[in-house]
Image: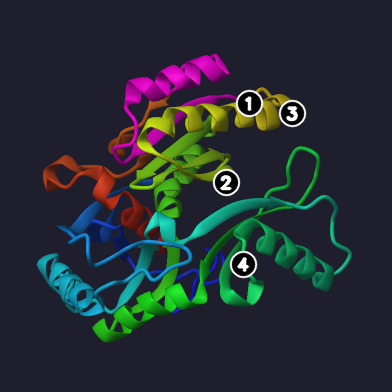
Amino acid sequence: MKMIGKLIYPQYPTSALGLEKNTAAVVQLGRAGRGQFNLRRAATVDLDGSILNPSFDETNIQNPQELISTLRELAANAGLGRQKKWSVTLPEATTRSVVMTLETEPSSSKELEDVLQWKAERAFGASYGDLRISREPLSKDSNGKPRYLAVAARLNVLAEYESVFEALGWRAGLILPRHEGEARWLEMLTRRTQGGDSLLISSHQSGFTAVLVSRAQPVVVRSMICESEDRDDELYRFLLFYRDRVLEKENQGRSLESFLLVGNGFTKDKVREIIKETLNTSAKVLSADEVGLVNLLSSNIPFDDVAAPAGIATLAW
């Protein structure tokens, strides 16, 4: 099992597992049309708070046997008990992500690797040898500077999850943080509509992650660790950064047209208010149907519970 970039191996399973501190979800996705998908099979379960403690630096799985038993039963309940190949989204606090911009074009592959390793160590606050890092090249910025999306997790933390999957007999070929699965819906949306920028706000117990997506690629990724009462201020500052460093600097007539909320950290009205105040624009809140997961109401499963694993499962097509 490897944490790998989306572009390395093109064949991914239609089944995915999503993990968070208090919940786990499994899905098997079906194609419902161009850019549209539905849940062929799905199930969710609440996790006891003593099983999983998501963290970038510390032990995550407090009770491996209980997690193994719970996931085995969860897959069986979804009719996926015999499924062996999975994609996986890990809890948000377990991984870290950053968009890295290079000041100049490296003159060789070795120089590129050296620069990316140096930037990764600074961004993730850990030795390169202690990390497993996925890197995906993005389009250049408005000044022609190379950009890369980097996602990292500590090797010892990933080994905990690997041990659980091995005990289940599962082969997890693609492992990404929760927000990458959720942002996938916005990437597909902006590709289909050729519209303006979209914002993902993915809330979790320790704060939230914000991802700005433009032309089917992430522009800015920020994970905010904060108290509940500080979330609004953190979102305000994030949008000011987007306004001052992206919109005004690039001056390409872009605007934030829509946003997707996952989790319970924000209300739709409050996000609209903050967007209006910082960007002087009105943004539309997106539903599951609008981003491409259709007929969800008939499953009685909340979009928040399956947005990440279902999003990563779309990579099967």
Tell which circle, 1 or 4, labels the residue nearer the N-terminal end.
4
Read off the residue under disc 2: 217
Tell which circle, 4 or 2, labels the residue nearer the N-terminal end.
4
From this viewpoint, is residue 59 visible?
yes
Instruction: Report the amino acid beneath label 3.
Output: Lys
Residue 306, percent from left and from top: 27, 52
Disc 3 versus disc 1: distance between alpha carbons? 8 Å
Tell which circle, 3 or 1, labels the residue nearer the N-terminal end.
1
Residue 150 sits in quarter: bottom right
Q: Which residues are magenta?
A: 254-283
Disc 4 versus disc 2: distance between alpha carbons? 26 Å
Tell which circle, 1 or 2, labels the residue nearer the N-terminal end.
2
Q: Secondary structure at mark 4?
A: loop
Residue 313, percent from left and from top: 36, 60
Residue 244, percent from left and from top: 68, 26
Instruction: Report the amino acid beneath label 4.
Output: Ala
Q: Quick one: label 2, few (<14), some, or many (20+) residues within 10 Å?
A: many
Residue 278 located within the stretch drawn in magenta: yes
Q: Quick one: label 4, few (<14), some, or many (20+) residues within 10 Å?
A: some
Q: Secondary structure at mark 1?
A: helix
Most foreground residue, 143 or 150? 150
Q: Nearer the viewer, mark 1 or mark 4?
A: 4
Q: How is the image coloured?
A: rainbow
Q: Secondary structure at mark 2?
A: strand
Read off the residue under disc 4: 126
Read off the residue under disc 1: 243
Instruction: Report the amino acid beneath label 2.
Output: Gln
- The reply to whether callout 3 and callout 2 are in contact (CB within 8 Å) is no
Instruction: Report the amino acid beneath label 1.
Output: Arg
Read off the residue under disc 3: 249
